[in-house]
Amino acid sequence: MEQTVEQKLDALVKLQVIDSKIDEIKKVRGDLPEEVRDIEDEIIGVETRIGKFNEDVKEFDNAISGYKIAIKDAEKLIKKYEEQQTNVRNNREFDAISKEVELQQLEIQLCDKKIKEAGFKIELKKKDVESTQLQLDTRKADLESKKGELDVIIAEGEGEIARLMKDRDVCAKNVDTRLFTSYTKLRNNYRNGLAVVIVKRDACGGCFNQVPPQRQAEIKDKKKIIVCEHCGRILAGVELIIVPEAPLKKGSALKEKELVKEA
Ligand SMILES: [Zn+2]
C-alpha cells in the first residue's frame, strides 16, 4: 500500500535516529581507526625503503665482484706481458709491452678505488637500514598498541551496534526506495551524518539557514517532502515551541489553558 508523506517522513526520522545512535558509538573510536590506517601505510612505506636499501647493497656487492674479476683479468694480462717481455727482439717491443703493463696496473688501481668507494657506500646503506629498521620496530609497536586500544573500543560498542543494525534493517524496509537513496547520499555528504532534520528556531537543523514561514507551514502540513534549499537535507518537521511557564497571576487559569491549546 502506498505510504502517505507523513508515514514516509516518520520512517525516515526513525532511520535517522538509529543511524545517529550508531554514529555516536562510532565517534567514541575517534581518530583511532584513521591513526591505525596511517601507521599501517607508514610501515608499508618504511618496509619498501628498507627493501630498496638492501637492493642497493646487493648492487654494490655485485659491482665489487665485477671489479675483483677485472683485477684478476688485469693481473693475468700483466703476467702474460711480463712473459712476452723475456722474448722481445728489441727495445721498442719491450717498451711497447711495458706500456701495456702500465695500463693494466692503472686499471687495477682504478678497480681498487671503485671497490673502496662501493664498500663505503655499502657501509652507509647498512647504517640507513639499521636506523630505518629501528624506526620500523617503533612504529610496529605503536601499531600494536593502537590496534589493541581500537579492538577494545570496537568490542565494547559492537554488541550495541549489532542490535541497532537489526533495528535499522527493519526500519529501512519501511523507507521509500527513492527517499532511501537520497537519504544515503545526504548522509555520505555531511560529516555529522544528518540527512533528516527538523526546523529549529526558524532555521534548518542541519545548516542553520533560515527557513521562511511559508515553507515551515508546508513542512508542518506533511503533504509533500520538503528539503532545505541551502543544504538539501530533508526537513521532517518543525520544532514545537515550548511556551515558557511564565508565572501566572492568580485567577488566570483560563489563560494557561489557552496557551496549551495554542502550542
Ligand atoms: Zn539546511
Image (spheres, rainbow, N blue to C red):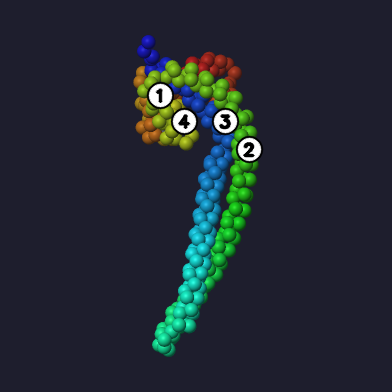
Q: Name the residue under label 3.
A: 25
Few, some or many residues within 10 Å of mark 3 (<14, 14–19, 20+)? some
Q: Can residue 203 be seen in this view?
A: no
Few, some or many residues within 10 Å of mark 4 (<14, 14–19, 20+)? many
Question: Mark 3 belongs to which amino acid?
Answer: Ile
Q: Is mark 2 on a helix, strand or loop?
A: helix
Instruction: Identify the residue at horizontal 48%, vertical 25% (top origin).
Output: 16
Task: State the residue lying farthest toward the top.
Answer: 1
Question: Mark 4 belongs to which amino acid?
Answer: Leu
Q: Mark 2 points at which residue?
A: 148
Q: What element carries label 1?
A: helix
Q: Is mark 1 within 8 Å of ligand 1?
A: no
Q: Name the residue under label 1.
A: 180
Eye-nearest disc, 4 or 3:
3
Say whether marks 1 and 4 touch (CB < 8 Å): no
Q: Mark 4 points at which residue?
A: 194
Mark 2 to mark 1: distance in Å? 36 Å
Mark 1 to mark 4: distance in Å? 13 Å
Q: Quadrant of the N terminus?
A: top left
Q: Which of marks 4 and 2 is nearer the N terminus?
A: 2
Question: Mark 1 belongs to which amino acid?
Answer: Phe
